[in-house]
Amino acid sequence: MEVEDESFVVETVEIIKRPGQTLGFYIREGNGFDRPDGVFISRIQMGTVAQSNGLLHVGDEIVTVNNVKVGNMSLDDVVILMSIPKKLVLTIR
């Protein structure tokens, strides 16, 4: 699902985790350029669901995880939040 948010396109991405399966992407605080805040995709592993479905891209900002806003959360808290459920619903822009 795509929605316009000011000058950004906001998308909802659903990822179903299987037992023993990694998410297939890495996150970082800030975008590495002009934004020290926010949570961003920093790398996508080859051969994973995240890579094969093509819905996530390096540089995407994760706005919510399962409807929880993550912009002001620590990176450790976001990792914990993403590790709990079998089904992740990410809002990205």
Image (spheres, rainbow, N blue to C red):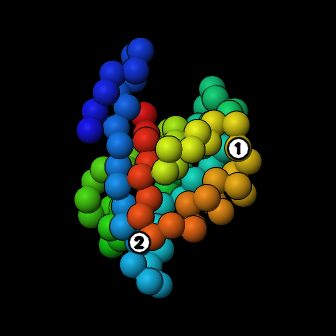
The residue beneath circle 1 is 73
Residue 8 visible in the displayed image: yes
The correct choice, above or below, for 57 with respect to 45 in the image is above
Q: Residue at x 47, y 74 (%)?
A: 22
Residue toward you, 33 or 83: 83
The residue beneath circle 2 is 17
| CB-based contact (under 8 Å), mark 1 and mark 2 | no
| SS at mark 1 in the image | loop
Q: Residue furthest top?
A: 6
Q: Give the residue type at disc 1.
A: Met
From the viewer's perspective, tell me whether residue 74 is left or right of residue 11. Answer: right
Q: Earlier in the sequence, mark 1 or mark 2?
A: 2
Residue toward you, 34 or 41: 41
From the viewer's perspective, tell me whether residue 15 is left or right of residue 70. Answer: left
Q: Residue at x 39, y 78 (%)?
A: 18
| SS at mark 2 in the image | loop
The correct choice, above or below, for 30 with respect to 48 in the image is above
* Quadrant of the image occupied by residue 77: bottom right
